[in-house]
Image (cartoon, grey):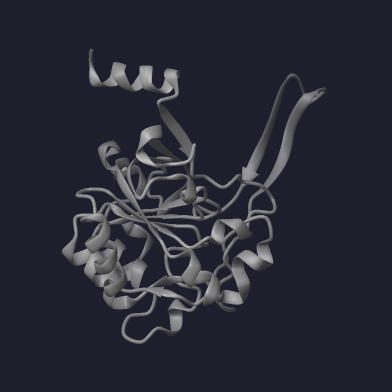
């Protein structure tokens, strides 16, 4: 039997679970606010086209308006100035949208300090216990922030959200083969990333500059095993797009330690 047939059988028999890592998208989805004088991303909004009425008696559908970086979304390399000559979201090969994942859980540290920053030392200690980061895969950074998703003010937290130290982001981009980093917060960088010494917005600067990707506003990372999940990220292939809202799915074996 082929590998793909085994996968379908596993899904049907529920020995393999598909876990949705995507936050539902609505008018209340939290969105980042940029400093005064900068352009601002649009929050999600919709306008009805028809709802089985005179405007369209057989159809219900809406026009929608939002930025490329609203809700759970994918950051392409071209999103940041350091990656301006890199791939736009439509140019990312589909094989690079699927990869193994590990979950680094620093939710306790983030609960104690909303400005917590992941360091190289944190990752080294994690690797000493759990093994290496996955080749060609994702580092999923769990902070517990998804629990705040229903309250935009608590989710944005006045700009105080966890992130990654500049030295660590540079190391991940330059010394690993990761596809990228996935986070539960509004962006891959810490809320106070503009003020970090060295390189402000280090995840965007180093990861996008190295042709890597970002996934943001993930949820349900606590349902995944520490390692063994496969992540499928599905952004829209917007020509010239810097990113896109995405449906992000993780496949796990129920015996792998995840909670389905």
Point out residue 96 in the picture as x, y percentages from the top left corner: 27, 42
| In the depicted structure, whether residue 16 falls above or below residue 93 | above
| In the depicted structure, whether residue 182 falls above or below residue 155 | above
39, 180: nearer the viewer: 180
**Residue lying farthest to the left in this orientation:** 175
Point out residue 70 in the picture as x, y percentages from the top left corner: 55, 54
**Residue lying farthest to the top in this orientation:** 1
Point out residue 132 in the picture as x, y percentages from the top left corner: 20, 56
Q: Residue at x 66, y 62 (%)?
A: 152
**Location of residue 40 (image quadrant):** bottom right
Point out residue 198 in the picture as x, y percentages from the top left corner: 31, 85
Q: Residue at x 52, y 45 (%)?
A: 22
Q: How many numbered marks appear?
A: 0
User: Which image quarter holds the N terminus?
Assistant: top left
Q: Residue at x 37, y 34 (%)?
A: 255
* Side of 1 where 20 appears, left or right: right
Q: Residue at x 24, y 64 (%)?
A: 173
């Amino acid at each position: 039997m082929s590998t793909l047939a085994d996968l379908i059988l596993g899904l049907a028999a529920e020995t393999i679970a598909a876990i949705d890592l995507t936050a539902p998208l609505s008018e209340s989805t939290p969105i980042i606010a940029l400093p005064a004088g900068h352009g601002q991303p649009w929050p999600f909004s919709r306008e009805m086209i028809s709802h089985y009425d005179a405007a369209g008696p057989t159809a219900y559908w809406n026009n929608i308006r939002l930025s490329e970086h609203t809700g759970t979304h994918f950051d392409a390399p071209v999103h940041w100035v350091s990656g301006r000559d890199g791939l736009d979201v439509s140019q990312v090969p589909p094989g690079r949208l699927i990869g193994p994942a590990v979950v680094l859980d620093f939710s306790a540290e983030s609960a104690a300090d909303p400005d917590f920053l992941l360091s190289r030392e944190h990752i080294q200690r994690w690797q000493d216990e759990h093994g290496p980061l996955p080749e060609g895969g994702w580092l999923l950074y769990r902070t517990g922030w998804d629990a705040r998703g229903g309250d935009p003010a608590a989710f944005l937290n006045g700009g105080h959200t966890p992130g990654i130290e500049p030295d660590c982001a540079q190391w991940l981009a330059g010394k690993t083969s990761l596809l990228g980093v996935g986070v539960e917060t509004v962006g891959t960088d810490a809320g106070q990333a503009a003020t970090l010494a060295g390189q402000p917005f280090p995840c965007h600067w180093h990861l996008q500059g190295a042709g890597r990707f970002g996934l943001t506003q993930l949820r349900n990372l606590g349902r995944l095993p520490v390692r063994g999940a496969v992540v499928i990220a599905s952004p829209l292939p917007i020509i010239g797009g810097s990113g896109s809202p995405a449906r992000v799915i993780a496949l796990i074996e129920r015996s792998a330690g995840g909670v389905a």
